[in-house]
Image (spheres, helix red, strand yellow):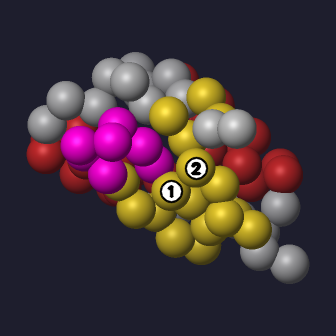
Amino acid sequence: MSKQVSLNVSDISCNHCVMTIKRELAPVEGVEAVDVDLDAKQVELTVQDDAALERAKALLDEIGYPATETS
């Protein structure tokens, strides 16, 4: 069952960041949808499971956009 997760990504600063994040996360196994809110500095993910979420968070960290889950 899919779930939606909001991630805070404080290093999002421009539309290039938005496009990079979308491009990099789209092919991650288990990630079904990616939406990036530049103003709120948040990434909204729809993921199949916790493993997909962890893969997405690890990739964000690897490409220079460390993320923390919103509470």
Q: Is residue 36 above or below residue 13?
A: below
**Callout 1 secondary element:** strand
Q: Choose the circle earlier in sequence order: 2 or 1.
A: 2
Q: Is residue 38 above or below residue 28?
A: above
Type of amino acid at the residue the image marks with label 1: Glu
* Contact (Cβ within 8 Å) of mark 2 with mark 1: yes
Task: Indicate left or right for 50 with 39 as reference.
Answer: right
| Quadrant of the frame with the N terminus | bottom right
Residue 20 visible somewhere in the drawing: no
The residue that mark 2 highlights is: 6
Residue 41: within the magenta? yes
Whether residue 50 is visible to the viewer of this picture, yes or no, is yes
Residue located farthest toward the left when viewing the structure as drawn: 15
Determine the residue positioned at 61% across, 28% down: 68
Taking the view exactly as shown, the residue that stands out farthest to the front is 71
Farthest bottom residue?
Answer: 1
State which region is magenta. Answer: 37-43
Describe the element under mark 2 as helix, strand or loop.
strand
The quarter of the displayed image where residue 35 is located: bottom left
Cα distance in 3D space between marks 2 and 1 = 5 Å
Q: Is residue 69 left or right of residue 41?
A: right
Type of amino acid under label 2: Ser
To which residue does mark 1 refer?
A: 44
Q: Residue at x 45, y 48 (%)?
A: 43
Residue 46 coordinates in the image, percent (x, y): 62, 67
Left or right of 67 in this view: 39: left
**Residue 56, position as x, y percentages in the image:** 61, 44
> Residue 10's spot in the image, x, y percent?
38, 24
Q: Residues within 10 Å of mark 1 (few under 14, many from 20)?
A: some
Q: Quadrant of the C terminus?
A: top right
